[in-house]
Amino acid sequence: MVSGPGEPGSGPVPPPADPGDPRQWCAVAVAWLDRDQPEAALEAARNALDRDPGAQTGADWGYRLASLAFERLGREAEAVAAAEEAVRLAPGSWAARLRLGAALRRVPGRWRESSAQAARAVRYAPEEPDPHVLAGDLALLRGEHRRAETAYRAALRLVDDHPAARVNLGLAFLRWERPRGHHDPAWPIDPRETGRARNAMEIWSRQVRVLLAAALAVAAAVTFWLGLAAEARIGGAAVLLAVLAITFRQGRRIRLWSYVPRMLTRDPWLGMSVSATLAAVVAYAAAIVTIPPRILPLSPDALPRALASPEPPGGAWAALAALVLLNGAALLVLRVPVEAWRGRPVRALAEFTAVHRDRTARRNIDVTLWLLVGRAWSVLVAAALAARLLGEPRLALAVLAVPPAISWTRARGGRARSLDHVLAVDRWLVVAGALLVAASAALAGVAAVALLGLPATTGDWAWGAGGVTLAALVAVFAARSARAWWRGAPGPWRSSLTMCDSRGPRPPGDVKPPVGLSGEVRRAFTYARGVVLAYADPDGPRALAVGAVSSVSPNGELRLIAADDAWEAAERDPRVAVFVADPLERRFWAEVRGIAVGDAEADVLRVTPKQVVVAEYPGRHQGRHHGRRQGRVTQAE
C-alpha cells in the first residue's frame, strides 16, 4: 500500500526534558514515527515501558507505539503481541482496539479477529474517523464493496478530507479486487498456500491449452495434407497421456483441495480459465476422434479455402478445433471490455480528485482514466462492427456520443485541474484521447457518407481511417503498458489500482495519548461516597448511584462496583458517564465520559476515560479564586 501526501517530518527529535517521565518518551516515539523512523520510535517506546514497567502512567500508550513501530519494521508477530498487551491494560480504549485490529489485519488467517477489533473500535468511538476507515478497509479487502462504502462514508461525515477514506471509497466504486482475489482473508489459512494452489492451476491451464492447440494443429496437418488420419488419431490420443502427466504433476502442488471450489468462485477469471481448459480437453478428444480423413493440396491457403468451401471438412469438427485453438484468445478478448466496464469510474474519479495531493490518489486517477479510454474504445469498436456486419453504415452515428462523454467525464470527475495535472504527467493519455476523437470523427464520416449519398470511395476512406485510428489506440495502450513494465512502474490496467492508508496531516488514531485524571479529580473519586453512573437504557438514559469507586488506577481507569442492570447496559452500549462531587470542599464537580467494560474476574466495571469535564459550583468561593476557570475539558484520545 502507498501512503499519503506530503513529506514526513524531518530533523532530529530532542530528548525528553524529564528522562524519567514515560509519557515524554511516548511523545518522542510519536515524533519519530511521524518522521518515518520506526527504529528510533521503537527505542523511545521501549524507554517509556522500561520507566513504567506496569504501564501505569502511560496506560496502553507505550505498547501501542511499540506495536506500530514493529508493524512498520515488518515484525508482525511482535506488533500483535504489543497491541494485545495494550488492550489488556486498557480494554476500553478505542485506540488500543484500533491498533490491535490494524496489526491483526497483516497476519494471515486472522481477518475475523481484526474485523472484530475494528467493530469494537467503531462502537467505542463512533465519532472518530479511523475506526470506520479500518472497518471499510477490511470489507474492501474481502470484496464487500457495499459495506466498505458505508464505512468510508461514515468516516467522511466526520472528516471530509480523509485521504484513505476518499481513495478507498473510490476503489469501492470501481469494484476493486485485491491482487490475490482468489483468497478470502477470512479463511484461517495462509494466503501463500492458496497462492501456490492458484499458481499450480494457472500453470496447468496454460500448459494444457498450449499443448492441445499445438497437437491438434499437427494432427490436422498430418491428416489433411498427408492423408494419415489413423496415425493422427493415435498420436493425438497419446497427447492426452501427456495431459494426464501435467495434471498429476500440478495437482500434487495443491494441498488445499477443499478450498479450490471457493477459490474458483471468488476469482471468476481463474474459474473461467480452468473451465475453458476442461472444455478444451473434451473438445480436443472429440476432434481427434472425429477428424475428417480429407486430403488437401500442399498450399498455404488450402486449409482456409477448404473451411470456407460449401463442403468444409466437417462443420462440427471446425467448431471443436476453434474451441481448442482459440479459447485463450477468446478469454483475453472478453476480459478487456469486462474489466473496463466494471464499477463506476466517474464516481471514483470524483473521490480521487478530492484528495489529489495524495500520491496514491494521483496514481489511481491515471489508471481510472485509462479504464475510461478502454470503455470509449469498446463503444467505438462495437458501433463499427455493428455497422459493418449488418450493412447499415448509419449505425456508426452512435460514435458521436463518445466526445460529449469525454467532456462530461471531465466535468463530473471532480476537480478538472487535478485531471489536467495527471494528463500533463501521462502524455500517452493525451494521445489516446486525441485518437478517440479522431476515430469518432472517422466513423461518423462513414454514417455521413451513407446519409448524404456520397461516393462509395469516400466511405471506404472513412472506414480505413476509423480502422487505423482504432488500431493506433491499441498500439498506444500496448506501448504505455510496455513502458510501465520496463520501468517497473504502475501500468494502465486495473491491477495497478491500490489502496491508501494515509490520514493526511492528522496523526493516526492509534498513536493518540490516553486521557488521564488530574490530581483533584483523582482525589474526588477516591474519597467520594456519592458517585453516579449514567448509561443508556432501552427506555432512555438512566442514572445509577454507585456507593463508591472500587479503585482508581494510576493511569486513570475507574473501577466500579455496579448492579447487574448497569453491566447489561454496558454490554448494549459501553459509552457511559461517571459523575462525582468534590467530597472535601464542595467546590467543583467532575464528569468522566468513557467506555465501560466488564471484568468478570474482578467483578467490576472498568471505565476507560475518553473525556473529562470539570466545573465549579457557583458560590462565594469564586470571589477568592478569580484565576480559576468555571469549567474545563480534557478531550479524549
Image: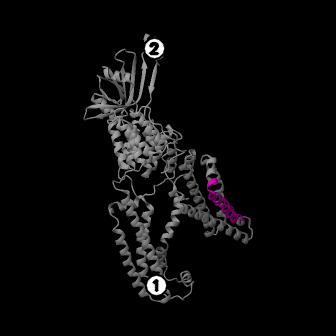
Residue 5 in the figure: left or right of residue 554: right
Per the image, is 250 magenta?
Answer: no
The residue to which callout 1 is attached is 292
Q: Nearer the viewer, residue 349 or 3?
A: 3
Question: Which residues make up the magenta segment?
Answer: 423-448
The residue to which callout 2 is attached is 625
Q: Nearer the viewer, residue 472 or 507?
A: 507
Q: Which mark is residue 463?
A: none
Residue 393 in the figure: left or right of residue 140: right
* Count of number-bearing discs: 2
- Measured as percent of width and height from the top left, residue 146 is found at 46, 48
Q: Quadrant of the C terminus?
A: top left
Q: Residues within 10 Å of mark 1 (few under 14, many from 20)?
A: some
Circle 1 sits in a helix, a strand or a loop, which is it?
A: loop
Residue 266 in the figure: left or right of residue 298: left
Residue 412 in the figure: left or right of residue 101: right
* Amino acid on which the number 2 mark rests in the picture: His
Residue at x 37%, y 15% (from the top left corner): 586
* Amino acid on which the number 1 mark rests in the picture: Pro
Circle 2 sits in a helix, a strand or a loop, which is it?
A: loop
Please determine whether, in this image, residue 101 is positioned above or below residue 440.
above
Please determine whether, in this image, residue 435 is positioned above or below residue 164.
below
Q: Residues within 10 Å of mark 2 (few under 14, many from 20)?
A: few
Residue at x 46%, y 45% (from the top left corner): 37
